[in-house]
Structure formats: structure tokens, C-alpha cells
Image (cartoon, helix red, strand yellow):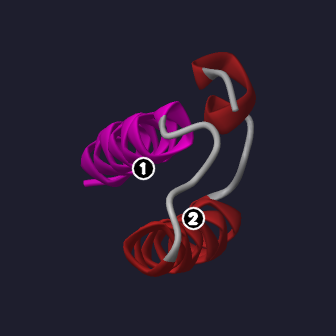
Amino acid sequence: MKTPELRELSVKDLKERLDAEKANLVRMKVNHAVSPLEDTSKIGKARKNIARMLTVLNQKENESK
């Protein structure tokens, strides 16, 4: 997801997507340990998406204070 799309989401929705993305990352890492993924760049992309979501979430929480 792109940053402008994330900024449109509410804090609750952002937290839900963040949890889902973290679970997806763990699943991908386990699958990669068992049998190598064809496209290993997906792990890095998932990590960057999580970082992007955390950044937007922190910005939104700081704005509400």
C-alpha cells in the first residue's frame, strides 16, 4: 500500500492491517525456511510496508495528542 492510501485510513483500520501484515510476514519467513520462496523480495517489501504503516500510525497518534 502506498503512503497516501494509508493516511486515509482510520487508526483502527491501520492497526488491523498492521497486524495482518505482520502475520503475513511471519508466515512468509516460515515458508521460506521450509522451502525457498521463488521471489524472496516479497519479504523485504512486507517489512517496508510494516515500517510505512508504523510511521503513519505514529504520526496519526501524535496529531491526536
Query: The residue tagged with tag 1: helix, strand or loop?
Result: helix
Q: Residue at x 70, y 32 (%)?
A: 1
Query: Is residue 19 rendered magenta in the image?
Result: no
Q: Which residue is mark 1?
A: 50
Horizontal side of residue 24 vs 52, given as left or right: right
| Residue 22 on image: x %, y % | 46, 71
Which of the marked residues, 2 or 1, is nearer the chain's N terminus?
Answer: 2
Q: Residue at x 53, y 76 (%)?
A: 31
Q: Amino acid at mark 2?
A: Glu
Query: The residue tagged with tag 2: helix, strand or loop?
Result: helix
Q: Main SS type for the magenta part? A: helix
Horizontal side of residue 24 vs 43, given as left or right: right
Horizontal side of residue 21 vs 43, given as left or right: right
| Residue 38 on image: x %, y % | 64, 43
- Point out the stretch of residues depicted in magenta: 41-65
The answer to which quarter of the image holds residue 8 is: top right
Q: Amino acid at mark 1?
A: Ile
Image: 38 above or below 15: above
Image: 64 above or below 45: below
Image: 62 above or below 6: below
Q: State if disc 1 and disc 2 touch (CB < 8 Å).
A: yes
Give how far apart the Cα atoms at labels 2 and 1 are: 7 Å
Q: Which residue is mark 2?
A: 21
| Residue 25 on image: x %, y % | 48, 66
The answer to which quarter of the image holds residue 21 is: bottom right
